[in-house]
Image (spheres, helix red, strand yellow):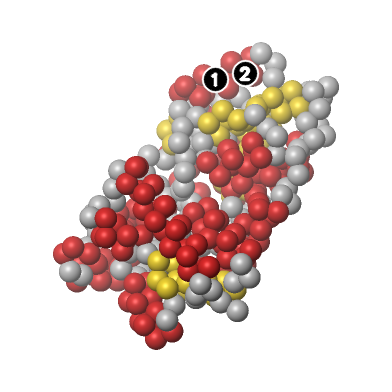
Amino acid sequence: MPTLHITRGFPAAGKTTWAEAFCAETGAVNINRDDIRRTLRIGQHGTQRQEDAVTSVQSALFAAAVDNRSDIVLSDMNLRPKRLRPFLTGADRAGYTVEFHDFRAELDELLRRNAARDVERQVPESLIRDLWSRFPQHRWPSAERIIATVRAMTDGTFSPVDNPRDLPHCVLVDIDGTLAHHNDLRSPYDWARVSQDTVDESVRDTVQDIHAAGVRLVIMSGRDEVCRPETTEWLARHGIPWDELHMRPTGDQRSDWMVKDALVRAHIQGRFHIRYCLDDRQQVVDHYRAIGLKVFQVQPGDF
């Protein structure tokens, strides 16, 4: 049975070195976005149109390798599970096994290795630091969880929410990226510093108007329950009304869309009619719409 190998890691973590040696030894097909960019003479990152072209080439190479029943290596960073969905779905349908290969290293070591690279392969130090902050290694979801999530989305495991209009009406409102912005002053997962976030005045004005009209405001947050005291203090300090606040259970490391699906079904379905949702994160927006909810996306949030 052929195998899809997926690397995960930051720039300079050793993914390319491993992939090239592995493919030379086994005959597996290495598919890498940087290689495609170099072929197209795009540089490290192109325009949206150019990146779409890279994705098209990547998808075509993957499809051809699957048709050949070749072992495949996707040797990019692969830190966003959503980006893996078409490849995992295709591999699953073609009867591939899937193996993840994690390349972990400390920040200082990544910076040292990057500085030692050939100039054309170096990436800005600021990029490595940003990725390190946004994708903490201890929060990388397990391979089993990623695969199970993709299968659930593909198979339609999540049924539409029952949303009768004769129940009290509510609006679901997200916090991070919607009501609040950390502005790179903290890691997205630094729960101890959420009180430092700035408020989005436009969204705050909107939710104040909603509440004044007599509609229940239910705040639905992907934040860990551990920072509930800091979160409620922040909401009060910025004059944000709310009727219920539901948060990620402590230690739950599932994707935001899965957490919010569970919160909606546990706390909202059967009690309220959800008029609409305010959120920014693309995976949540997509899922809310998939289960039959109206969503207004306050800003792009494809991460």
**Relative height, residue 198 to residue 3 (above, below):** above
**Relative height, residue 112 to residue 186 (above, below):** below
Residue 208: percent from left, percent from top: 58, 19
Q: Which residue is mark 1?
A: 206
**Is label 2 in a helix, a strand or a loop?**
helix
- State the residue lying farthest toward the left: 119
Residue at image coords 41%, 58%: 58
- State the residue lying farthest toward the bottom: 25
Identify which amino acid the numbered label 2 is placed on: Ile
Q: Which residue is mark 2?
A: 210
**Relative height, residue 53 to residue 205 (above, below):** below
Q: Tag on residue 192? A: none
Viewer-proximal residue among 7 and 43: 43
Identify which amino acid the numbered label 1 is placed on: Thr
CB-based contact (under 8 Å), mark 2 and mark 1: yes
Looking at the image, residue 171 sits to the left or right of residue 167; the answer is: left
Looking at the image, residue 96 sits to the left or right of residue 168; the answer is: left
Viewer-proximal residue among 227 and 175: 175
Viewer-proximal residue among 264 and 182: 264
Q: Quadrant of the N terminus?
A: bottom right
Residue at image coords 43%, 84%: 26
Residue 11, image quadrant: bottom left
Viewer-proximal residue among 224 and 97: 97
Residue 48: percent from left, percent from top: 35, 42
**Is label 1 in a helix, a strand or a loop?**
helix
